[in-house]
Amino acid sequence: MQSAPVLTVLPPRERFAPGHAGAISLLVHRLAAPGDIVVGSPVEQPFADVVFLAVHRVPWIVWPRSTVGRYSAGVARIVRQVRPALVEIHNRPDIALSLAGCFPDLPMTLTLHNDPRGMRGAMSPAQRATLARRMRVIVVSDWVRQCFAEGLSDVAVTVMPNCIDMASLPPPLPAAAREPTILFAGRMVADKGADAFVAACGEVLPHLPGWRARMIGADRFGEDSPETSFLRTLRPAAQAAGVEMTGYLPHGQVLEEMVRAAIVVVPSRWAEPFGLTALEAMACGAALVASPVGGLPDLVGDAAILAPPDPVAGLAAAIDDLAASPERRAALSVRGRARAALFDCVAARERLGALRRAAVAGRLPDGL
């Protein structure tokens, strides 16, 4: 007799499809076990190697609530059909609470990828305490754990860092064989420090003959990302600074760019809850410059140079010093690869399996 599956619920805006997947969808796909079912908003061509069920929102005439309420009702309908052993909800406390109300006896977990204090259903300590009583709460970093625990005297939260599939990456190049490229990869928004990267490169490139700077990304994930006012302002500034903007590229191409680039910069202003781009850069062997915010310092350890994006002079100095020192780039490349190996998905899948078994059994996972 086949055991009941695990049902993983994506946030409504996540697209579970090659070329369109954001960080959460990529992680869910990377960790999916045989028999898992992923549910989310409809996409034309979802990942082919994982069972995917599209959530069709209940019409407002039938379910006169918010869009999220109708999404939750659509997920609930799938839960009734599938009858899973466990439901995993990603990054949406409001959806998790809605499902817990519909299925009070069904084991559930809530994985938080961001600071929950700004999320509906988790803004206050009382709301977060309710979540911890109703389901097992998982966070991607100790920084997110601290955010969740703020104002609570005793709360059980499991830290399970994001992971990377080291075996699937393009073969890394030695530091001496890398292109003299300074690379930014991520969403083109102020929170990610895209404008700070342009400004810093504008300062250093005139003094770095033979070097170039490239930016990969758009406002959102996917080729259909809109042209925003931020991008319209950034483009002429990048051109003046000598920074090439490629636009959105599929995830695989981004990793190939990281493998070739000498330096990757993650200049986030926003407190990164984990910092998946930084992990990917280290895994690809690039010398990394990262912001000292959120979960980034704990993630990179001694395998990166930490420099805030504001004022830009500090970021520019860090990039300039690293570009001028091949020995330092080589050392960071070696340390980065070793650091990234600690987050390999092989171990992460084992930990997730243990956590799932504990959640179904209704007990705290040992050693997690």
Image (cartoon, rainbow, N blue to C red):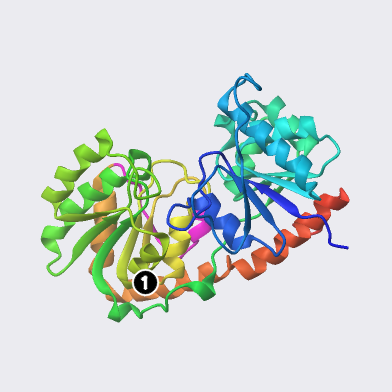
> Above or below — where is 90 with respect to 259?
above
Question: In the image, residue 332 lies at what x, y percent?
Answer: 40, 70
189 or 48: nearer the eye? 48
Tell me the residue that label 1 is attached to.
Answer: 259
Say if the magenta span includes residue 299. yes
Q: Quadrant of the N terminus?
A: bottom right
Question: Magenta span covers which residues?
Answer: 297-310
154 relative to 30 in the view: left or right: right
Q: Tell me the element at label 1.
A: helix
Residue type for callout 1:
Val
Mark 1, Cα crowd under 10 Å, few <14 / some 14-19 / many 20+, is: many
Residue for point 11% across, 48% down: 240
Q: Quadrant of the C terminus?
A: bottom right
Question: In the image, residue 158 lies at what x, y percent?
Answer: 71, 49
Say if the magenta span includes residue 246. no
Question: In the image, residue 253 lies at what x, y percent?
Answer: 36, 65
Residue 152 visible in the current orientation: no
- Examine the image and state in which quarter residue 181 appears: bottom left
Residue for point 24% across, 59% down: 214
> Above or below — where is 263 with respect to 46?
below
Residue for point 34% across, 45% down: 224
Question: In the image, residue 59 lies at what x, y percent?
Answer: 60, 26
